[in-house]
Amino acid sequence: MPDATDQVQKTLEAIIDRLNRWKQPVIVGHVVPDADCLGSMLAIARAWAGNGVVPRVALPDGCVSQRLGFMVEAAQIPVATAEDFANADGFVAVDTAKKSRCNVGPHTPESWADGRELINIDHHSTNTRFGELNWIVDTASSAAEMAHGLIRHSGRNIDSTVAMLLYCGIHADTGGFSLPMTSPNTLEAGAHLVKCGANVPLIGEQLCRSQRLNEFNLLRTIYANTRLVADGRIAYSTASYDEITGAGCAAADIDDQVGVPRSLQGIRIAMLFSEGNPGKIRINFRGEGGLDVLSLAQQVGGGGHRESAGAVAEGSLEEVVKRVVAMATDYIDKECSTV
């Protein structure tokens, strides 16, 4: 677990107290949930389920990618309905920096948490602390690392399924324990989860070696559309709405494909522009060599982490790409000139 001060200990105890008292909590994450978000949500729900407690998870139809469906199937946690939101005695938001980014679905009232406590567990430095209880650790590798610490601190059982869910989240957010946020705490959490039954070969197969043909075809597009600019310091790729749907995929299937442009040697910024829905362009930013891309993402109204951020821009794919690539070029010129 990330290092705990006295104040953090008090916050953890307060969170555990609420979870121990609630009978019908709803666990929410961010829109387009990735493995870290899903793993944290499902693991917390599963750890507290039983003895009359029936947690639900907020996963609106179509929001989970084909690749990560195995996590939902393994967890066996009910998906929250509108009635569950109305009857919930409390909420937990994980891996989500802003309340407006909570994945509650288009038909849930904006007042979904009014009058009931909302616990906010996150590792984004841009978190707005929108909960009544906020546990924010921006040095944690992942929300799953934090969820592991919470569950372990509570004394709740970490069975092999919970271990798998949390290991998936940590593995995904650290790039297989290879990215800068990987710490001794991260590695210790991973080791403990393996001891609890996380099946490392199976997780590796599911996350890294189980692409369906349509996902593979989408990846072909990402490779074909990859471009280098700014003297090879910026690599980016694109996927239009027609290209995504033509491959048999949807917005939920856009996740870590930014790893394609990121894999090029010598780049400092990698970007993926994807039009999951017409006119709405999701931009994934990744920084290499310690370059801060959070500041760049914030210029487009986004957020995230120092070396891993995102934003959504409205307009045509061509216009957004032209505008943001120009911004990124100016940005990297200024950043590199100060080094």
Image (cartoon, rainbow, N blue to C red):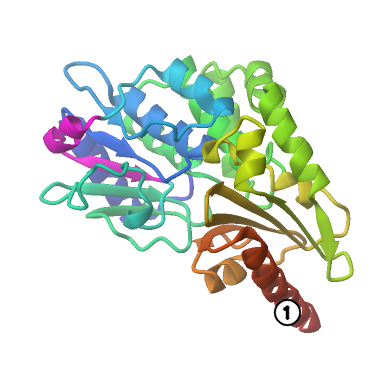
Q: Quadrant of the C terminus?
A: bottom right
Q: Is 172 positioned to the left or the right of 59 in the image?
A: right
Residue type for callout 1: Asp
Q: How many numbered circles are shown?
A: 1
* 159 vs 13: above or below: above
**Which secondary structure lies at badge 1?**
helix
Depth check, front residue: 303 or 138: 303
Q: Position of residue 11 (x, y in %)?
A: 29, 50
Residues rendered magenta in the picture? 81-94
Crowding at dot 1, Cα within 10 Å, few <14 / some 14-19 / many 20+, comes out as few
Q: Is 175 positioned to the left or the right of 81 in the image?
A: right
Which residue occupies 23% across, 30% down? 81
Quadrant position of residue 80: top left
Which residue occupies 45% across, 42% down? 146
Depth check, front residue: 186 or 212: 212
* 265 vs 156: above or below: below
* 61 vs 128: above or below: above
For the question of whether residue 187 can be seen, the reply is no
Q: Position of residue 169 (x, y in %)?
A: 54, 35
Quadrant position of residue 131: bottom left
Which residue occupies 79% across, 49% down? 225
Residue 318 among magenta residues: no
Residue that label 1 marks: 330
* 248 vs 231: above or below: above
Q: Position of residue 72 (x, y in %)?
A: 44, 23
For the question of whether residue 282 can be seen, the reply is yes
Quadrant position of residue 29: top left
Q: Position of residue 2 (x, y in %)?
A: 48, 47
